[in-house]
């Protein structure tokens, strides 16, 4: 009786393991640009964005130079400052903003807009009505390529955008 129970338990565990792996893979395939949150180490800046993937496509087709880009995928990217900040020499009050960018070869234009929930480049197209700040951030290249668009903060609280071999340093203070 004990032997049958043990065999049944092992068989059940194997079936569950295989089913879970198959279901997890199907679930992962549903979200092509998963939502992510990045936060500065002191938790004074939080950014919520979706992470599109290159999947063999050229970055220049997904985020073309000289055109407003939503800086992620799906809904507009939102950045929240717990304190007043100086960005590109401009004072920005504590609050939540939509972050869009205009990619360039050596620099990117970073735009903060008070219109939240905008999809695509809408915040950039309507910048005059809700634009809070616009400033330049330096762009560079790396020998390492990132498949998924990523945003991270360094130890000094500065924000870094990376996708493909492009890296953009956004000074926050």
Image (cartoon, grey):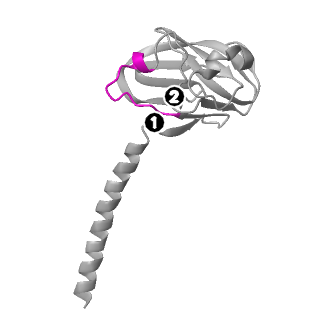
How crowded pointer 1 is (Cα within 10 Å; few <14, some 14-19, many 20+) is rated as some
Mark carried by residue 74 = none
Q: Is residue 53 magenta?
A: yes
Observer-nearest residue: 72 or 140?
A: 72
As displayed, is residue 116 above or below residue 8? Answer: above
Identify the residue at image location x=36%, y=49%: 26
Q: Secondary structure at mark 1?
A: loop
Which stretch is magenta? Answer: 50-62
Query: In the displayed image of the protein, which residue is found farthest to the bottom?
Result: 1
How crowded pointer 2 is (Cα within 10 Å; few <14, some 14-19, many 20+) is rated as many
Is there a contact, CB below 8 Å, between mark 2 and mark 1?
yes
Identify the residue at image location x=65%, y=37%: 43
Residue under label 2, please give it: 72
Q: Is residue 161 left or right of residue 115?
A: left
Residue 16 percent location from the top left of the image: 33, 66
Dominant SS type (magenta): loop
Residue 155 percent location from the top left of the image: 56, 30
Q: Is residue 112 magenta?
A: no
Identify the residue at image location x=31%, y=70%: 13
| Measured Cα–Cα span from mark 2 to mark 1 | 8 Å
Residue under label 1, please give it: 33
């Amino acid at each position: 009786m004990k032997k049958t129970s043990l065999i049944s338990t092992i068989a059940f565990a194997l079936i569950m393991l295989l089913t879970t792996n198959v279901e997890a893979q199907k679930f992962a395939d549903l979200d092509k640009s998963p939502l992510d949150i990045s936060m500065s180490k002191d938790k004074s800046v939080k950014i919520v964005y979706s992470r599109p993937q290159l999947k063999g496509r050229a970055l220049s087709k997904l985020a073309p130079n000289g055109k407003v880009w939503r800086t992620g995928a799906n809904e507009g990217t939102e950045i929240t400052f717990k304190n007043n900040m100086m960005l590109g020499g401009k004072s920005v009050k504590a609050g939540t903003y939509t972050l869009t960018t205009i990619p360039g070869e050596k620099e990117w234009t970073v735009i903060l807009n008070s219109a939240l929930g905008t999809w695509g480049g809408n915040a950039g197209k309507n910048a005059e009505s809700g634009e809070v700040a616009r400033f330049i951030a330096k762009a560079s290249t790396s020998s390492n390529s990132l498949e998924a668009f990523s945003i991270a903060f360094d130890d000094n609280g500065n924000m870094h955008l990376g996708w493909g071999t492009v890296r953009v340093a956004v000074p926050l203070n």
